[in-house]
Amino acid sequence: MSSSAVPHAPPPKTYIDTMVFIYHFMQHGLSSKANKFFQDIEKGKYAGVTTSFTITEYLGVMRKALTEARNKPPTSADVSKLRKLTNAIAMLVFAICCVTIFLLAMRKAIAR
């Protein structure tokens, strides 16, 4: 490859909001769009970013939804399950970051 080759630009960063996680993990009219969004991130079209605040907000939204669905506060077992789901989200975000870093490294190596 010639030295005048233009290196690939990193994918644009995009913030993953609480509702995108909710649409992804729950049955909702926008679930398919949220799923496609995460697939695009996995393919390197975007670099997904989120915050610990978003993950905490997700946990709060899920607690509220559970309370409303049952007409009573969640039990400690429910909260434990929500925490496990929140950990799964954190692992998903970590995996997305790892895939993004790997794709960027591969693009850089190929460009050389």
Image (cartoon, rainbow, N blue to C red):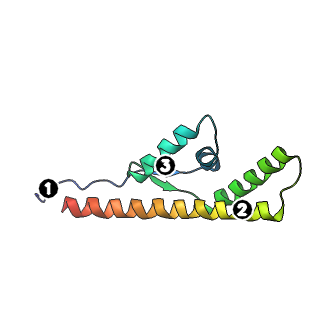
Q: Nearer the viewer, residue 56 or 89?
A: 89
In terms of secondary structure, where does tag 2 sit? helix
Image-based side of 64 in relation to 57, left or right: right
Alpha carbon separation for disc pair 1 and 3: 34 Å
Q: Callout 2: few (<14), some (14-19), or many (20+) C-alpha neighbours within 10 Å? A: few
Residue, disc 2: 81
Please identify the quadrant where the N terminus is shown: bottom left
Counting from the top left corner in percent of width and height, residue 92 is at: 53, 60
Chain-order first, disc 1 or disc 3? 1
Q: Nearer the viewer, residue 53 or 24?
A: 24
Chain-order first, disc 2 or disc 3? 3
Residue that protrudes farthest toward the right in the picture: 72
| Residue drawn at x 42%, y 50% as measured from the top left | 12
Residue, disc 3: 38
Q: Amino acid at mark 2?
A: Lys
Chain-order first, disc 2 or disc 1? 1
In terms of secondary structure, where does tag 3 sit? helix
Q: Amino acid at mark 3?
A: Phe
| Residue drawn at x 59%, y 36% as measured from the top left | 30
Q: Amino acid at mark 1?
A: Ser
